[in-house]
Image (tube, grey):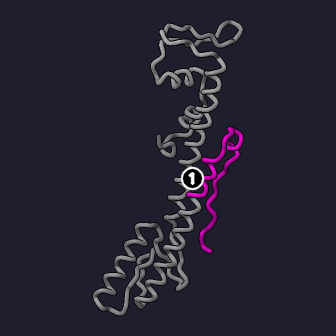
Amino acid sequence: MMLATMKKEAIEDYLNVTFADALFEMFNGAVNASVTKDDSGAIKIIWNDERPQPKFQEVENFRSKLKLDRLKEYKSNLVRVMFQVAQSENYTVKSGQTLQADYDSVQALDGAVRLVEQAGLKDVVLYGADNTPKTYSVKEAKDIITELAVRWQGIFAKKQSLLVELNSLNSLGEVEAFTPEFKNQKE
């Protein structure tokens, strides 16, 4: 489920795992039972299933794990969205020109420079993010591509390290406290 495209209320509902949600998931969506509350507010299960009825604590343990898994899924989607935003920001190279710096743009620039080099030409015209042209030697253009690729790789490595860190967390409190952040990648 791509949580990044869901509305806030839907995400909150998805992350709020109820006892009934856990029971439903525990039996892969096929439960012949109803969950209600009695007059005192205690959860009551009316079991109409041939399979053994799970103990309350089993369902609660499963519910905790399901909530942890859903929260991790939400946070990992958040990391991926933040990565997409960070890697697609324009970037000002050392020569002062601002270029589109996402992965596809860097690949396209690299391909264009290689074609120019193969054709035996000495100069390359790169168009900036604002469509202004600037002429570079093939070597200068390759240096710019390297600068952009190193920047992109740093952002990608940050995304991967955040996902590894998130995956290593084992408690709901740790995952709730996990706040991914992408710093400005100008360095």
Front residue of this view, candidates 100 and 42: 42
* Percent coordinates x, y for residue 134 in the rendering: 43, 86
- Give percent across and percent down for residue 173: 71, 40
Asked if residue 99 is among those painted magenta in the image, a careful observer would answer no
Nearest to the observer: residue 92 or residue 75: 75
186 falls in the magenta region? yes
Label 1 residue SS: helix
The image shows residue 166, relative to residue 89, as above or below, that is above
- The answer to whether 179 is drawn above or below residue 12 in the figure is below
Front residue of this view, candidates 134 and 157? 157
Question: Residue at the location (56% across, 43% down)?
Answer: 74
Q: Which residue lies furthest to the front in this view?
A: 52
Q: Which residue is drawn at 52% across and 66% down?
A: 89
Residue 109 falls in image quadrant: bottom left
Q: Is residue 72 above or below residue 160?
A: above
Tell me the quadrant of the picture where the C terminus can be found: bottom right
Q: What stretch is highlighted in magenta?
A: 160-187
Badge 1 is on which residue? 79
> For this view, does 94 lie left or right of residue 40?
left
Which residue is found at the position 53% from the left and 24% from the top?
26
- State the residue at coordinates (47%, 24%): 28
Q: Is residue 86 left or right of residue 139?
A: right
